[in-house]
Image (tube, helix red, strand yellow):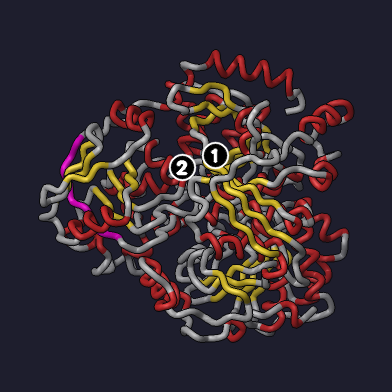
Amino acid sequence: MTAPKTLYDKIWDAHVAHEAEDGTCLLYIDRHLVHEVTSPQAFEGLRMAGRKVHAPDKTIAVPDHNVPTTLDRADPATMTEESRIQVEALDKNAKEFGVHYYPVSDVRQGIVHIVGPEQGWTLPGMTVVCGDSHTATHGAFGALAHGIGTSEVEHVLATQTLIQKKSKNMKVEITGKLKPGVTAKDITLAVIGETGTGGGTGYVIEYCGEAIRDLSMEGRMTVCNMAIEGGARAGLIAPDETTYNYVKGRPHAPKGAQFEAALNWWKTLYTDEGAHFDKVVTLRGEDIEPVVTWGTSPEDVLPITGVVPSPEDFEGGKVEAAKRAIEYMGLTPGQKLTDIEIDTVFIGSCTNGRIEDLRAVADVVKGKKIKDGMRAMIVPGSGLVRAQAEEEGLAEIFEAAGFEWRMAGCSMCLAMNPDQLSEGERCAATSNRNFEGRQGYKGRTHLVSPAMAAAAALTGKLTDVRELI
Amino acid sequence: MDKFETFTGIAAPMPLVNIDTDMIIPKVFLKSIQRTGFGKNLFDEMRYNRDGTEIEDFVLNKPQYRQSQILIAGDNFGCGSSREHAPWALEDFGIKVIVSTSFADIFFNNCFKNGMLPVVLPQEQVDILMKDAEKGENARMTVDLDAQEITTSEGEVIKFEVDAFKKHCLMNGLDDIGLTLEKADSIKTFEDQAAQARPWV
């Protein structure tokens, strides 16, 4: 009998194309997602070496980071010269090398990590990479998915493999049920608050437990998306009926007998009883509160009922980092988090730009108005999410409440496009990083769930959404 | 890629923990389609005022650290995005070695692809190097990859671990893609088998 394996072990073993004596492997890549920022140098490298894309059929390109999200974005003047060059380079490279491509004008265009699952490119048991750290998102399907640098993008384009050594196994279990007002975003932030941003370094995380099982695919994607913020290259959730139901019928998912064959294999993708994990973290679902970040690292997480900490609350190098963060964020130790006034709300990103996220926002803001003077934008994760939200009547709710209703893209999550914070502006954001300058030079970011962002838009302050529902 | 050779250089102390890739190279500089020229914007928001003037007390702006080739950094260096522009910027500035108690995985890998050596050491040894680096330009350290040693300005030798394959590639300036293509037969065999086992992929 073979030794019990984790889900990660199983997917890894199914993709080793070559193993050297020292354990260095060539891991075969089933899906390679490409966007405009981290790929131009890789395609240029291929061209210089006279190489082709090894498997163009497994390579999917979509521009997302640079693209404007205003309704007039078909007008080239909405992009800076540099952004335009990057998007045009992707356009040219996609055509020249013959990879699947969703241009800005295509209704299916959107954030690469939302488009992949939506189109059925991402399937259980696959290996998925992209030159973007939030590739971890696809782990929600029980796919081994992680970000890579541009040199590795070129390596995958040329060989369809990655040179890798195996990571360690880490289990994050969320037991029990979540309380009302608590979402997938709160789970993933609470985990990072517990482990720190380096806690997952060197590991692949498998999320499990009743609270994870209860999540929709959208929620699972939110959880896995931020595995990287905990330092783990990849986060995984074993596939189940929720997964199969999401996948079935998607344009690039297998059909008919192929689907049945795939399903038979997918059903073997779970961690065996007794398999070894090198690290285990367990949180009780009932203990998780709606959370916000107060600082400039995703580990700076507190329940919304808390107060801004003092640098002395920390140890070691974190004392200086906390001091710097409190100053950067313009906060005072002891200040109640619900007293922090905000002027901008950003709802979107690969973390929280899916239909369920927009429904959560609509539930909170329906029939209400956002605070006077508030700048609040909702940026759907793809053109198809946008279309669905319009069909469901969500867009009308948003516009009636005073939100800007945008086109799909990465938008203000990383501000490589016209959507940015100005110096000193403070934003409640559903994105994934609150780093210094992330949303704009000297901009201040508080990471929250979509429901919490909606609540903040209504009151003008960080707000406990449970008081509004 | 250039071969990594033993060198003696200035080390700059950056004790801040969780230095992320947005700090190393802010996204406004990711719009180039080239691999070079990022060094002038390394640590841009920490290094320059909004008007382009230098922030005097930032370590790499101090006269004694302007030619640094080694960074001694706080824990979890390079966390955040996968952008290889971060190692490109460090390399373009002249940094060849970064020492910390830990690195983010993707950043760590990206360094090796660009001829740079990230070194992981326990806290006590990072503290020794941090102290040495704080002495400024007269405290030059020697990094010997072959022997896996860093020698402080006072002659103290600190050994470090490095993956044998990555070391081999660095020392010989090897191109990963070329190495992998030598195993094209294995890849082909794998693809044929996978096409049988999982035809839907």
Q: Is residue A247 above or below residue A400?
A: above
| The image quarter in which residue B190 lies | top right
Say if residue A205 shows up in the picture.
yes
Q: Residue at x 48, y 79 (%)?
A: A309
Crowd around label 2: few <14 · some 14–19 · many ≥20 (10 Å): some
- Tell whether A414 sits left or right of B92: right
Q: Residue at x 53, y 74 (%)?
A: A294
Q: Which secondary structure class fits the magenta region best?
A: strand
Up/down of A261 relative to A185, above or below: above
Q: Is residue A179 above or below residue A212?
A: below
The picture places residue A105, in percent across and down from the top left corner, at 71, 46
Of the residues shown, which amino acid type is indicated by label 1?
A: Ala
- The chain under label 1 reads A
- The chain identifier of the residue carrying mark 2 reads B
Label 1 element class: helix
Q: Closer to the camera, A38 or A295? A: A295
Q: Which of B146 and A154 is in front in this view?
A: B146
B8 drawn magenta: yes
Describe the element under mark 2 as helix, strand or loop. Answer: loop
Residue hosting label 1? A89
Q: Would you call the spot at circle 1 few (<14 residues within 10 Å), some (14-19), or many (20 or more)?
A: many
Magenta-colored span: B6-14
Indicate the position of residue A349 as horizontal and vertical percent values.
65, 58
Name the image quarter holding the C terminus of chain A. Answer: bottom right
Distance from disc 2 to disc 1, alpha carbons, whole Å, reads: 8 Å
Do callouts 2 and 1 mark residues in contact (Cβ within 8 Å)? Answer: yes
Percent from the top left, x then y, of residue B183? 50, 17
The residue drawn where x is 65% and y is 46% is A236
Q: Where is residue A268 in the image (x, y as percent from the top left)?
A: 75, 34
Residue B33: give its label.
2
